[in-house]
Structure formats: C-alpha cells, structure tokens
Image (tube, helix red, strand yellow):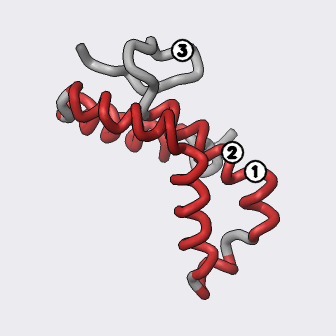
Amino acid sequence: MTAARDPSVLLNPIAQVRAAEVAATPATLRDVVADIVEQHDADIAHSFYAYMLAQDNAKAFSSHEVVKQRLHREMQRGLRALFPPRGARPGPNNHCQWPA
C-alpha cells in the first residue's frame, strides 16, 4: 500500500491530537460526558445525522440510506470508544487511552 493510500498516514496524527486533548480534559468531565453518551448515544447520532442530511451540500457525501445502514451505528460505536463508561478499561479495539 502506498503512503497516499495508507489511512494511518492521516489517522495517526489525528489520534495523537485526540490523545493530547483527552489527557488535557479533567477526568470528572470525561465521566459526565461518558454518562451522557452511555444513555443517549442513539439520540446524539440521530440528531447529528438529521442535521447533516438537512444541509444541501451534504447530499454529495451521504444519503438517508447510508446513514440508516451503517453510519448511525458507527457513530454510536465511536462515541462509546471515545467516552467509555466510568471505570471501563480501553479494550484492544479502543485506541483512546484514558489517563488516570
């Protein structure tokens, strides 16, 4: 795979920035957001995609069918990976390392 097609070329720097942001966020705030995500991840994903798909220029990037089939579920998974429930340890597929 060439560097131009290797997603890690783009994703690794993004992950580093995200890790720095997480490290700078107080644990109590992360816990509050994790509680909200745990209770309302489906609502958050629904609201996000409803707003996005209402924008005229979004139609070039996605559709209601794509959101329904895949993106809605992936956003919920991503939110839970970024904000795991209180006390949860990052798993092998969770690249978010929570500082103590």
Q: Earlier in the sequence, mark 3 or mark 1?
A: 1
Q: Secondary structure at mark 2?
A: helix
Please identify, in this view, whether the residue under mark 3 or under mark 2 is nearer the observer.
2
Residue ID at (51%, 44%): 40
Residue 92, position in %: x, y?
57, 14
Residue at the far front: name it. 39
> For mark 3, does the 10 Å Cα neighbourhood hold few (<14), some (14 to 19), or many (20 or more) residues?
few
Disc 3 residue type (three-letter):
Gly
Residue ID at (30%, 34%): 32
> For mark 2, does the 10 Å Cα neighbourhood hold few (<14), some (14 to 19), or many (20 or more) residues?
some
Disc 1 residue type (three-letter):
Arg
Residue at the far bottom: name it. 56
Q: CA distance from mark 3 to mark 1?
A: 22 Å
- Asked if residue 9 shows in the view, the reply is no
Read off the residue under disc 2.
73
- Asked if residue 40 shows in the view, the reply is yes
Residue 2, position in %: x, y?
64, 43
